[in-house]
Amino acid sequence: MKVPMIMTAGPTEVNEQVRKAMSERATNPDLDMNFFEFYKESIEKLKMIYKTKNETFILNGEGMLGLDSACCSLIEKGDRVLCIENGIFGKGFGPMCETYGAEVIYFSSDYKNTIDVEKLEEFLKLDSNFKIATMVHCETPSGIVNPVEKIAELLNRNKIISVVDAVSSLGGEELETDKWGLDIVLGGSQKAISSPTGLTYITISQRAFDKMEARKEPIPSFYCNLLLFRSWYQDREFPYTQPVYNLVANDIAFDICLASDYLNKHKKIAIAVRSALKRGGLELYAESGHANTVTAVMVPESIAYEDLFNTMVKDYNIMISGSLGELYNKVFRIGHMGENASEDKIYMCLNALNNTFEKLGFKPKEKLHLSFVEEVNK
Ligand SMILES: *Cc1c(COP(=O)(O)O)cnc(C)c1O
């Protein structure tokens, strides 16, 4: 299979060291007591990225498993959930919560901007009787980072448990789980951590565990039951066999992340990408809250998104992302998170993008890759 350079909004490129770790011999994770020590150390690294002292786990499934587990473990029939949303992932929390019997109330904000905190404050003055509020830190399809710190302040004042999807921001955007008082924060291996797809990260506050313990009805799942994970160290037993190869590789990805100045690296590259695109005459989708992990750009009117995507793959072997839902065909995205937050890769990607645009009859005002080099060295 011919593999393109993936400059998508996730999954991201996986570092060679991480891929090599997958092919090393691994132990039996059920019986070898050293495995539990390894897992513990790996969790300590993850806690550093989350900036938390709360209990933290790595679950064995793709990103959505974290969202599903949080909803499943917390929600009981009739619980009122506030779904705070300004995009596709944010809104998607609603139906997921309804699966577990929640009464979902939406606080919807403009999709081109960050969540309106002042309006949310007004909203909560009228109705704050919620057990849980869900939100997305980085709305990947639109490239917007929401003011989670300020939202959490409002929620904490009203004693509402926060569930934050940070799948495409963890490791790429400023995120302070404890300082901001967040309850559950979800991450995924395949985004800014750049480890193979298939693992979910989750950190859980004592308050959130208390809510799970205080349920009247048992948690209606085995695989999504977060309480079953709690005693793994004490009992030296997980609810199911751990995917040891993935975890070993993932641990190397944590090391690579922590050894770099990852937040500044993401910020510097993102600013230069946005400036280069604007200098080229392109329009960014978002009007505020531009993410440091992914940039969503309007497809020039004279071009069909499919031609853009296909030419990039066929002629340059580089894959970019489109967008989802209503933004499909209107927006394309460049992922610059994790391993892809690399000046060399972005240069290659923007060079190919520039040439693709020219082939398709849209000539950027300034060459995208050359502007990028200027901007990133400012
Ligand atoms: C990637 C992502 C997820 C996980 O979803 P998949 O698309 O199935 O990988 C969840 N939330 C956000 C915000 C994401 O970017």
Image (cartoon, rainbow, N blue to C red):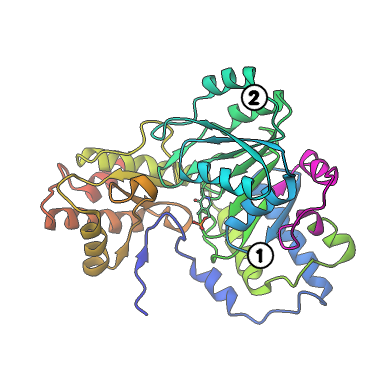
Say which element carries label 2. Answer: helix
Q: How far apart are labels 1 and 2 at the CA level?
A: 32 Å
Residue indicated by mark 1:
60
The one nearer the camera, 57 or 172, is 57
Answer above or below: position of 307 versus 182: below
The percent coordinates of residue 338 (x first, y second) are 48, 55
Query: Of callouts 1 and 2, which one flags the residue occurring earlier in the amino acid sequence?
Result: 1
Image quarter of the N terminus? bottom left
Q: Which mark is residue 257?
A: none
Q: Is residue 155 left or right of residue 260?
A: right
User: Going by the image, does 8 lie left or right of 241?
Assistant: left
Three-letter amino acid code of the residue under disc 1: Asn
Look at the numbered disc 1 and give the secondary structure of its residue.
loop
Q: Position of residue 172 (x, y in %)?
A: 51, 47
Q: Which residue is mark 2?
A: 154
* Vertical order, 277 against 109 (above or below): below
Please, what is the three-letter code of the amino acid marked with disc 2?
Answer: Leu
Q: Is residue 272 magenta?
A: no
Residue 317 visible in the shown view: yes
- Pointer 1 and pointer 2: residues touching (CB < 8 Å)? no
Q: Which residues are magenta?
A: 203-228
- 10 Å crowding of disc 2: few (<14), some (14-19), many (20+): some
Q: Name the residue rendered at 23%, 48% in the picture.
A: 368
User: Which quarter of the rendering shows the C terminus?
Assistant: top left
Between residues 80 and 182, which one lies in front from this camera angle?
A: 80
Residue 377 visible in rendering:
no
Residue farthest to the bottom?
Answer: 25
Q: Quadrant of residue 97?
A: top right
Q: Is residue 224 magenta?
A: yes
x and y percentages locating residue 72 in the rendered image: 70, 51
Image coordinates for residue 231, horizontal then vertical, percent? 85, 58
Residue 312 in the figure: left or right of residue 240? left
